[in-house]
Structure formats: C-alpha cells, structure tokens
Amino acid sequence: MRILIVITLIFCTTLVHGQDEKVNWLDFEQLEEALKKQPKKVMVYFYADWCAYCKKMDRSVFTKQDVIALLNDNYYTIKFNVESNDTIQFGGKTFTNKQFGKKRNPIHQIPEYLASRQNAEIELPATIILNEDFEIKKRFYRYISPTEMLSILKQN
Amino acid sequence: MRLLVLLLFVNICFAQKSKVNGKIIVDNDPIAFASIKFIGANESYTSYSNKDGFFSVDIPLGDYQLLVKALGFKLKSSAIKVTAQNKNNLEIEMIVDLLGLDEVVVSATRNRVNKKEAPIIVNTLGEKLINATQSLAVSESLNFSPGVRVENNCQNCGFTQVRLNGLDGSYSQILVNSRAVFSALNSVYGLEQIPTQIIDKVEIVRSGGSALFGSNAIAGTVNIITKDPVLNSWEVGSYLGLVDGDTPDRVLNFNTSIVSDDLKTGATFYGIHRNRDEWDANNDGFTEMVELKNTTFGTKVYYKPTDASRLTLDATVLNEYRRGGDRLDLAPHLTDITEELEHNTIMGGISYDFNNEKNNKFYSIYSSVQYTDRDSYYGGLGGGRTAQDSLTALNAYGVTKDLALANGFQFTSQFKRDVLTSGIEYNISSTEDNIVGYNRLVDQDVHAVGVYGQYEWKPNEKFSALIGTRLDHINVDGIYQVGDIERGVDISQTTVNPRVTLAYKISDNIKLRGGYARGFRAPQAFNEDLHISSVGGEPQFVILSDNLEAEFSNAFTGSFNFTKDFNTTQTNFLLEGFYTSLENPFTLVSTGAQLPNGSIVEEVRNGEGARVYGTNFEFAVSPSKKWLFQLGGTIQSAEFNEDQILFEADGSNPNESDILISEFVRNPNFYGYFNSNWTPHERFSLSVTGTYTGEMIVPFVVSDSGFLSLNESPSFFDLNLNAETHFDVSEDFQLTLNAGVKNLFNSFQDDFDIGPTRDSDYVYGPALPRTFFVGIKIGKLH
C-alpha cells in the first residue's frame, strides 16, 4: 500500500513537473553572461500590456510543450515589455526608456534597436530571432501560431 | 561626418554577388546592432552589425546609397562605391546624435483621444464610453458624439429615433456590421432593442461623405459593429437599475469567445435578457416609460481557409416585448390605451473576404438578412365605453412582416499610396404591416441597386482626396391604406450622386477637410410613418400623400482638426461646419381628424425646401492614462425656405386656422455632451458624463380636431455618475463591480399630457428620470 502511494506520488510529481515546464525567460543582463559562457541562438519577444495578440501568444504559443522544449534547448529567450522603464546594461552600453514620461506609449531603446523598421512602425507582438553571434536573422511583427513557431525555431 | 574607406586588398572585379565585410564605429569603438542598408539601382540589401560592430552582406560590387541607422546616432546617408579593394574591410563611422533620436513610433492603437488620419471624420463610440454611461441599449450611448441626438417620441411605446445634425431618423442610414439591413421598421424600435453588450464599437459619420454608403445617408451613417473574438474569454454580468428610485430595470448577460491557437477559427457567443417595469411619471395611470422584456442571443464565427481569406458568419436573434398605456395587467382591448408590440427579429449575414498574395487587392462578397415578425396592438377604448368603442378596440390587433436583404460585392485595390474601392450592392426591403380593424395597411417593396466607385488620391504627404460617385436605381412599390384613404407609390428612379472630400494637412497637427455630397430619397414609408401614436383617445396614423416626389439634398462640410501630443498629454480639437439643403423634403403635415372614428391623419408631403446648417465641435484632452476629458456639441439652425404648414385646418372651427412654422420642430439649436473619466489606479475608475439639450419647439395636440399648440421646451442637463472597481482574483478570473446614478439632477420633462385622451407624442428631453444602478461582471475579462 505504502509503495503504491509512493509510486502515485512520484507519478503525480512527474506529471505536475511535466506540465510545469515553462519557457526559461532571461533578462538582458543574464543573456550577456550566458552568451559569454556558451553562445546560443537567441529569441527576443517584445510585447506590451495593451496588446491582445501578445496575450494570445503568451497563452497559446509559449505554453505549448514542444515550443517550450525547443526554445529551452536551443535558444536563449528574452521577453521584454516595450514600454518598460528599466535601465538595461548590455554589451557595455546602457539602454533606457527615453520616451518615458514624454509619450503615452513610451518605447524603450532596446526594441528600438532590435525591432525598428524603416517606413513602418513597430507592430506587436514582435519576435526577433538572432544567431549565435547575436546577428539578427529574422524579425516577425505579428502573431505566430504554435505550428509556425516550431518551424521557425527549427529552421533558424 | 567622415567615411573611412580602407583599402587592403586588390582583387579582380566580379559581376556577381560578393561577400562584403565591414565594421560600424564611432571614435574607434564598435557600434552594435546598427542597421546597414545598401540601396542599389535595382535592389537594396540590409544587414545588421553584431555586438562587436561587424557586419557582412552579399551584394554585387558597384555604387550604392548607404543608409546606416543606429540608436543614439544620426542617420547616416552617403554614397559608397563597393569595390573588390574595399569589400572586405568597409569601415563606417557614425556621429553621436545630441539632439535626440530619429523617432520610432508604435502603432497608435491605444490612443484615448481619437487620431483622425482618414479623409472623412469618423467618430467612434467604444466600450469605454458605453461603460462610463452604463448604456443598456445603443440608443443611450449615441448622444455622446457631436451632432447626434437620440429622442424619445412616444410615451406609449418608447419609439426612439436618432437625429444627426438635426435631421430626423429617416435621413440617417443605420448599418449593422457595415450592412444596410436595418429596415424602416427596425428604425422604429431597433435602437432600443440592440443591447450594448454585443457591440464592439459604433462608428458615426456625419453628412454623406463616402460613396460607399447609400444615397439615403443624407444626414450620415451610424455603423454598429459587433464584437470580434481574439482571446479566449468569458463573462457573465448583471445590472440592476431603479428608475426614479423604485421601478426596477434588470439585465443579465453573458458572452464568451473561443479562438484557435493559429487564429484560423474563432467564435463569440452572447446572450442578454432585460426586464424593465413600466413607469408612470405623474400618477395618472398611464405610462411614461414602457414595460420592456428583451431576450437577445447571437454569435459571430469566422474561419480562415487560407492566410488570405476569411469567412465570417454572424447571427442575432432578438425577442422583445414592450407595452405601454394603462392597466397593463388587462388584455389590451379592455384598456383605455395600449401600445403593445412583440418583435421576433433575426439578423445575420455571411461574408467572404479574400485578398491576393501581394496583399494589395481585397475582395468581399456578402449577404445579410433581417427578418422581423411582429404582433402589435395600437389602440384601446380611448376613454369611451360604447359598444362601438369596444368593437374598435377589439380590432386593433395587427401583424407585421418585414424583410431586408443586402447583397453585394466590393473590390478594393491599394496602390502605392492611393486606394480604389468599387462595388455593387443589391438591397431589398419588404414590409407588410396590417391592422384589419382600422383597414390600415402598409405593403411596401423597395428594390435598390447601387454601383459605386471611389478613389482615394494622395498625391503627396499633405493632400488627400476622396472622390466617388454612386449610381442608384431604386424601385418602390407600395400600397398605403387607412380607413377610407388609399394611396400608392409606384416609382422607378435612377440617380447619380457624386461625393467629394478633400483633406489637407497643414502641419503634423492641423488638418483641414472639405466635402460635398449629393443624396436622394425615394418616396416610401420610413420609421415614423410606421409608428402609430395616440391622440384624443384615438390612434393617429401617418400616410403618404399622392404624387410624392423624390427628395434631393446637397450637403457641404468643412472642418478644422487639431491633434497634438504634449509629452503624455493627448489633445484633439475639431470644429466642423455643415450646410445641407433639402429639395422637396418629406414633411409630416397634420390634416386633422379625417377618419370617421375621429382619428387624426398625418400626411407625408413634399414640404418647402429647407436648409440645415451649423457647427459641430469636439474638444478632448487626456493629460495621462489616468484622465480623460471630452466635450462636444452642436450649434445649429434648421429652417424652411418658406413657412411650412404643420397643421391644415378644415375650417369647421373658427378658432382653428392653419399652423405654419419657419423652423424644424423638435430640434434644439444647441445641444452637447461631456465625458470625463478618472482612473487613478488599475483597480478603480470614476466617470462623470452628461448631456445638454437646449430649448426647442415641440408640437402639442390641444383639441380633438388635431389643432396644435407650439410649445417651447425648457433646456435639460442630464448628469451621470459611475464608479467602478476591478479585482484580479487570478489570471483566469476577474471581477468588476460598479454603481452609480443616471440623471443625477432628475432633469426631466414635467408637463406630460394626462389621461386616456393624451397626446402620446408630446415627449421630449432625457429618456430617463433619476435612476440608481449597480452592476457586477465576472469572468476571464482580459
């Protein structure tokens, strides 16, 4: 009987553990450290509180076990609120949100760096894929479905 | 600005692409994550520098225009020759930008103050305002837009209509999801029947600016757009209002959305039940506000077979019961006055939208339908107790069938800057309203074919023009009877109606617009003509006169729009002038008690020409996300060119003569609204909203013959408060509580006519007396 309980417990823990698997989001400081130790591909995901399709990405894409597995194994992943007011140290430079307090939707310098386009506004959600040398490979300014995300992550 | 080109290698020049390597620097320090664009004669190539400032790109050797963008540095633009010599070591030096950044903007999706880029001014009423005013039906929220006023027209049945720029309901086109399925019959009670819970937003365009709308949109269009699903969410809500402190108004509603992970399919479902008791303002036993029971449910579903196509289906079913008059517990024919209506309406549509691969050609095929089956009772004993009174009362039951169909195809082509929209539309509207007892019949079929083309021309950044024209062929076949009067309309007419709007951007903040639109209406029964009121204890009917001719309009608008953000403060100011002239306007003329039973008949005639002109203004400022202030209104005049007859005396009473009037009745020269909202915290918000209605002339029937007195109404100020608090119980469960009061100062009409012989049309001013309310909403709200 006791053994049965233990087995059940172990089974439950694994099950819970299996479901609890989450995307291992890093911040930029952690990313810098990680890139120095072991270069890996990077995915940067930009969102804002008011963006409905970003919420959809959070709930429907970054919760899928195969997406999570692929991301955690092969990528460093960063999730960044474009309206954040944090000061970020990265690559020996300081990035801030210079528009904070000046604009209604203030954009941080980080997304301006990585996601700005010519003749077009940044549209959210924005997903940036970079290679091991932190060179931008692909940029997406739209909702990406789980299946598409898998193929993007496998391709690059 | 220096461009250092270091020559290192000597190589033979190849025509094909070569690998070009380089580095972006400032004072010998590398610049990471800069974007480097080589613009060649035929093609351009983009690359980004890595964290050490290095970049590489595959391009053919030759001459390029170089564009380098990096944050905190000035945009660098210079000519460069990429040769075999320099291709492996291009060094590009940047200059630090001391004056600030070249700005990057995020889509202005969350502006609290509307940005007005479009050539036509569109006012949008969204969820926020509906919430702030706690509007239960569309009719309640429309007042909060310049130039729009909703009025209640009958205390027996609660007939409402929306006036745009002072012109009555029949001059506006009401669209549901951009389709013209709101029939003449729907426009009698429909605005009060559509619950706000199903609405995503309401878009209002004043005056006939766009050729996409029907030619009968002389005063403008009101487009009711139902909710589109994005997130998986659900919501259950309830509202309890106490009208005048004691008459309950209860609402229970739900809605839920499910959208697949790939966004290829989605559905939203909603349902609302409302139950409001009748209310009597002056204790004469006759209602001022009708009893209302409304159950609505519906869905909107979409499916995307491919990335470039979408199939959308929507359907709403509504069942509404309303009754006003006296002794609502008795059968209608045993009362003095009863107006009782039971509507069963289904509204729905299907549309298939697709576009080409390049995403610049869009096609839409649609078909929408509305069908209403209505049981009515307009009548009663009217204070009399004779056998004849009883017989008449017993025969006042009626049946109505109403069908509207809108089918069309639209093609939109986007060029570099310009947009061409063209389409064809076929609309059918068929109404049969029959009350045997009065020998009352409206049997009307309207077929309309419209072909339109519109070109949005933007030759440069500053100037844009919307030039369009619409060809309408309309066929009206109608029989109108009441008592011994019989009229008919059989008309086929083709008209061409041009529309032009010009817009000029003086600066980033100031935009001027000017427009002209021609409109026309074929003679037919509109909203008011289908409504039966009660005067002197007898029903009052409207009938079209013989030889009614089409009505034409010329509308001019001009506007000044200032929009500017001062740091986080958003401001918007709009000043708009309008001038509309009407030829042969359809005008209601009371011909007195014509029918044998003493019923008054009003005739629709081609009235004197008229002009409606004035100014709409709107001012909005939002200093931060916490505050929003909005103020708008209209100052206007609506005059007949020659005095218009309103009542035609039959000469039997020497004290009664014809009544003539020089201006429109029921139309204030000044009306407006304000809307303010304070959200100090994510969890709490407070709204104060209000409307002002200026003095106006309201006709009042003072004798059995239908003789009128022209009364001047006082002005009204209707103030509403709503406080709301929000709790995020968990990520998947939230709760919103709210409470407040509508019409805080109880600014309300105080001279209602009384008793069984009252003039039920003599109503004006705010729709509700002081009303307290509480509400709750639970669910996965966001």
Image: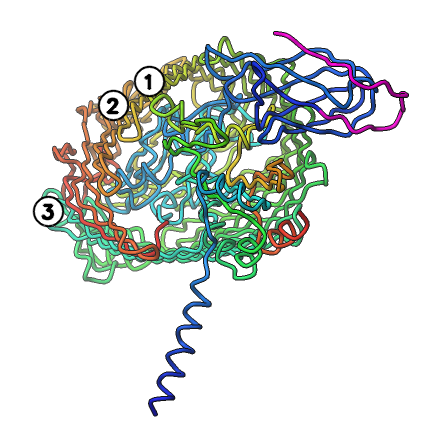
Residue B397 in sight here: no
Q: Quadrant of the N terminus of chain B?
A: top right
Which badge, 1 or 3, comes first in the chain's sequence? 3
Instruction: Look at label 3 and name its amino acid.
Output: Gly
Which mark lies nearer to you, 1 or 3? 3
**Coloring scheme of the render?**
rainbow
Rendering coords of residue B84 (x, y %): 83, 20
Chain label for disc 3: B
Task: Specify whether B319 is left or right of B183.
Answer: left
The residue carrying mark 1 is: B663
Q: Earlier in the sequence, mark 2 or mark 1?
A: 1
Q: Quadrant of residue B567?
A: top left
Q: Are marks 2 and 3 on the same chain?
A: yes
Q: Amino acid at mark 2?
A: Ile
Q: Please, is residue B624 above or below residue B362 in the view? A: above
Q: Is residue B525 above or below residue B456?
A: below
Letter of the chain that mark 2 sits on in the rendering:
B
The stretch in magenta equals: B1-21
Question: Do pointers 1 and 3 mark residues of a single chain?
Answer: yes
Which numbered disc covers residue B697? 2
Secondary element at tag 1: strand
* Mark 3, residue position: B245
Task: State yes or no: residue B382 in magenta.
Answer: no
Label 1 to label 3: alpha-carbon separation: 38 Å
Foreground residue among B465 and A153: A153
* CA distance for labels 2 and 1: 9 Å
- The spot of residue B231 in percent (x, y) is 45, 52
